[in-house]
Image: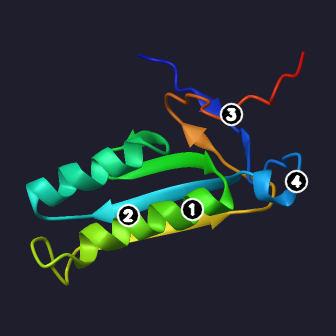
Amino acid sequence: MTRLEVRNPRIGKIKGASPSEDRFYVMVLFDISDAKKYRRVIRILKGYGHRIQYSVFEAYVKSAQIRELTAKLTSVMASKRFYDPDDKVRIYRIASNCELTVLGKCVDHAPENDVFV
């Protein structure tokens, strides 16, 4: 019998040196049927965060990066080559201090604070 790991890390907004440097916890969930489109979306998301399930990514990103990510995903989702009205992508931005309960393996991908010497 294996032991179940239960963790409750804090997630949400991380204050930066200025409002433009603030980082937000973002979860991206998607359901895509075409294999090429799926791989393209995965490639985009890997540039921003970490995969936590087959179709779920999480990241700590700045507001500008959220807009950039949304634009890239919109481009793929709306392209004539890959368009499918049944495909879906959801981007959740979690801005306050929320509580997360993880049952199973939990890897903390929160960014470290900047270090100035």
> Marks 4 and 1: which is nearer the front?
4
Q: Which dot, 2 or 3, sits closer to the camera?
A: 2
* Distance between the alpha carbons at the discs numbered 3 and 1: 16 Å
Q: Which residue lies under the disc numbered 4?
A: 18
In the image, 88 versus 21, the foreground residue is 21
- Judge the density around disc 1: few (<14), some (14-19), many (≥20) Cα neighbours within 10 Å: some
The residue tagged 1 is: 66
Q: Which mark is residue 72?
A: 2
Q: Which residue is mark 3?
A: 111
Q: Are marks 2 and 1 in contact (CB under 8 Å)?
A: no
Q: Amino acid at mark 3?
A: Pro
**Quarter of the C terminus within the rendering:** top right
Left or right relative to 7: residue 114: right
Measured Cα–Cα span from mark 2 to mark 3: 23 Å
Q: Secondary structure at mark 4?
A: loop
* Residue 23, numbered circle: none
What SS does tag 3 mark?
loop
Residue 13 in sight here: no
Q: Secondary structure at mark 1?
A: helix
Q: Where is residue 54? Give x, y as percent.
A: 30, 46
Label 1 sits on what residue type? Answer: Ile
Q: CA distance from mark 2 to mark 4?
A: 25 Å
The residue nearer to you, when weighing 38 against 65, is: 65
Quarter of the image for residue 103 reads top right
